[in-house]
Image (spheres, helix red, strand yellow):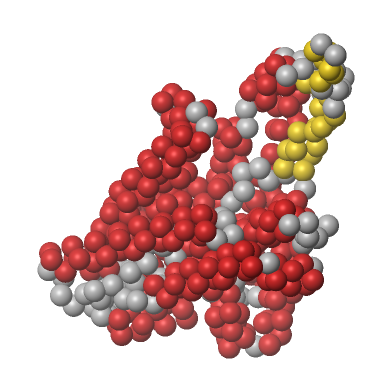
Amino acid sequence: MLTAFFRAFRTPDLRRKIFFTVAIMALFRLGSFIPTPGVDFSAVRRCVDLASTQDSQGLYALVNLFSGGALLQLSVFALGIMPYITASIIIQLLTVVIPRFEALKEEGQSGTAKLTQYTRYLTIGLAVLQSTTFVAISRQQGGLFQNCTETLIPNDDLFTLGIMVLTMTAGTGFIMWLGELVTEKGIGNGMSLLIFTSIAAAFPSSLWAIKQTQGFNTFFLVIGIGLLIMAAVIFVEQSQRRIPVQYAKRQVGRRAYGGTTTYIPIKVNMAGVIPVIFASSLLYLPALIAQFQQNSTAGWVRWINDHLVQGDHPYYITAYFLLIVFFTYFYVAITFNPDEVAENMKKYGGFIPGIRAGRPTADYLEYVLSRITLAGALYLGMVALIPLIALILVDANQNFPFGGTSILIVVGVGLETVKQIESQLQQRHYEGFLR
């Protein structure tokens, strides 16, 4: 593997792409530390230090995760890549319910370019909405950091607030552009690599905080747990059920076509990290609504604050797990259509040995898919609950770096990036990374 890395760096074109990607990632991290105009950065730092010791940022943990900690620092990249992720998911879901979007998806490259343009527009719209909400919360004492009464925005006139919203929205647009640059001129997977950068950047500080508060024994225990989790995630992410497919031999004139044997790969985790993001976002909404009603004495506000804000509550754990299972089945159902696959196989003369073409093939694929998805859903649910289990085992929840979402993204993006580099090496007749 090290030899393959050296060969990659000895390839001028590939070396240029790697250095370009690293430079973009460094620029992305730099923007995470530049404060937004109008923010008292020293007050923000004091609140961040207080929150890191009291785990007060749980409500915004998901968005803060994808921004690499920039959200709670009120930087120009505070929103991170989250608006783009949300927009991409929404557009992907709309392709199922809106015939126009479905037609664009089937048009090929031109249709995909049009959907990408819609995603960009929706990203900016969501960035305006999220930045406005975020700035409104930051104006209130204790709004962003519940146990900190510092004034984060000293001058909260309309002009200053407008500049803050504009700056954060522009930061999201700039991040989106950086991701597209990496995809076009770097090693690919631009948006995914930026998310990878945000999450991986928090690992050293989180591990060191555990060492400072819990000692070396817990520190090494967490590292050991992390390595085991990574190995398990890699194993499951690479696992797939291969359904054999044979294509009938056809004689056209003097030439014979077909007669080959291939397979349909059905991954154990076909949904990736999307169900975890969906479940986290859905549980985030009631807590956010209750946050705006924090001075209210209504019973439903108290119930949400007692049961759906703290991640170690049994109600929260149960709801989180069930939502992940539900969204796994939901996402797989809209991304893999057994009827369409069976129809395409029948059109080109393909069949599964022992299964008749047409409707029986679709029923068989749906039967296999439902059982594979159950294993994938349970796997995602267990991985997502790792930080909550860590709270009980090592009492390091607020600094535990190997959370379910983090590991799934880091491992998934890492594997995909290695495959991208490997494919470019193979084009030059070099030995790749993966064996």
* Relative horizontal placement of residue 161, taking residue 142 as reference (left or right): left
- The residue shown at (82%, 15%) is 250
In this picture, is 228 found above or below 244?
A: below
Q: Quadrant of the C terminus?
A: bottom right
Side (left or right) of 83 relative to 257: left
Q: Residue at x 71, y 33 (%)?
A: 369
Where is residue 335? Give x, y as percent: 58, 35
Q: Which x, y percent locates residue 205?
A: 55, 80
On the image, the x and y values in percent for residue 155 come to 15, 75
Q: Quadrant of residue 91?
A: top left
- The image quarter in which residue 228 lies: bottom right
Residue lying at the far front of the rendered structure: 254
**Which residue is pictured at 84% across the width and 17% down the height?**
255
> Which quadrant would the N terminus be assigned to in this image?
bottom right
Q: Is residue 267 above or below residue 136?
A: above
Extreme residue in the top direction: 253
